[in-house]
Image (cartoon, rainbow, N blue to C red):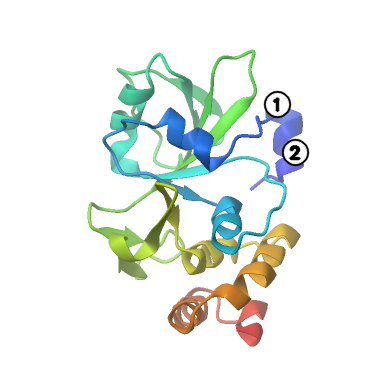
Amino acid sequence: MMEHDEILRLYGPWKPNTPADAALLLDGYPGRWWIAGGWVIEAFTGVSRIHGDVDIGIPRADVALLCSFLHQKIDVWAAGGSLTPITADSSDLPEDCENLWLRASGADPWEYDVLLENTDLSTWICKRDATITRPFVDVLWQQDGVAFLRPEVQLLLKAKRAHPKDTSDFDTCLPALDQGSRLWLVDALRQVYPDHSWLRRI
């Protein structure tokens, strides 16, 4: 996966949106969605940092529903190796496409990165290891009416690359995690990344 600076160089800038902006865009959307990425850690801890974009998670099965809702609001592009515009009546995606990028037009900066998750209606399934599952009600929490991924779940997803910003998020978030969240993260890390350096610090 390319670094954020390389993505900017090749594909152009991103608008500095917030989760509140995402909530305005998706007001009235009938499907499930949640905020993921670094904004999860900021919302949970109250510690601000610079963000490159806003990550929105949705079930992959809801791509057509989302595209229909966003039609004439904002352009949707499949970001899976190449960028392909998605229309309201053509929402089929390549199997390896895991992201949708949203922007107002070709002359505007990108606004949102939509992460496509292979989940079902009631169960969250980890993209790193499909044997790790939790009821959806246990992996989301709310702040100001916006759903966020649980911080321990987000840290598991960040652990794959553990870039400096991800390690910083781990350092910021760890003291705020309760015992149950820490135990879940330890178990999940041991299963997916048994030699991960974070395990020695939890």
**Marker disc for residue 108:** none
Residue 123, position as x, y percentages in the image:
27, 60
Is disc 2 in contact with disc 1, using a CB cutoff of under 8 Å?
Answer: no
134 and 41: which is toward the camera: 41
Q: Residue at x 43, y 18 (%)?
A: 73
Q: Residue furthest front?
A: 144
Q: Check disc 1: other Cα within 10 Å, few if <14, some if 14-19, many if 20+.
A: few
> Looking at the image, is 165 positioned above or below residue 200?
above
User: Where's residue 78, x and y in %?
Assistant: 48, 30
Classify residue 56 as left or right of residue 107: left
Crowding around mark 2 (Cα neighbors within 10 Å: few <14, some 14 to 19, many 20+) is few
- Mark earlier in primary sequence (2, 1): 2
Q: Amino acid at mark 2?
A: Glu
The quadrant where residue 155 appears: bottom right
- In percent of width and height, residue 27 lies at 37, 31
Q: Residue 143 placed where, x, y %? A: 45, 53
Q: Could you tell me which residue is drawn at 41 percent across and 35 percent down?
A: 94
Looking at the image, is mark 2 or mark 1 nearer the viewer? 1
The residue at the point 62 percent across, 59 percent down is 46
Identify the residue under disc 1.
Answer: 12
Residue at (70, 66) in percent of width and height:
167
Left/right placement of residue 163 relative to residue 186 reads: right
Callout 2: helix, strand or loop? helix
Marks 2 and 1, Cα distance to the nearest angstrom?
10 Å
Q: Residue furthest left?
A: 121
Residue placed furthest toward the bottom? 200
Q: Identify the element where label 1 is drawn.
A: loop
Mark 2 highlights which residue? 6
In this rendering, the answer to whether 69 lies above or below 99 is above
Question: Is residue 79 something one can see in this rendering?
Answer: no
Q: Quadrant of the C terminus?
A: bottom right
Q: Label 1 is placed on what type of residue? A: Gly
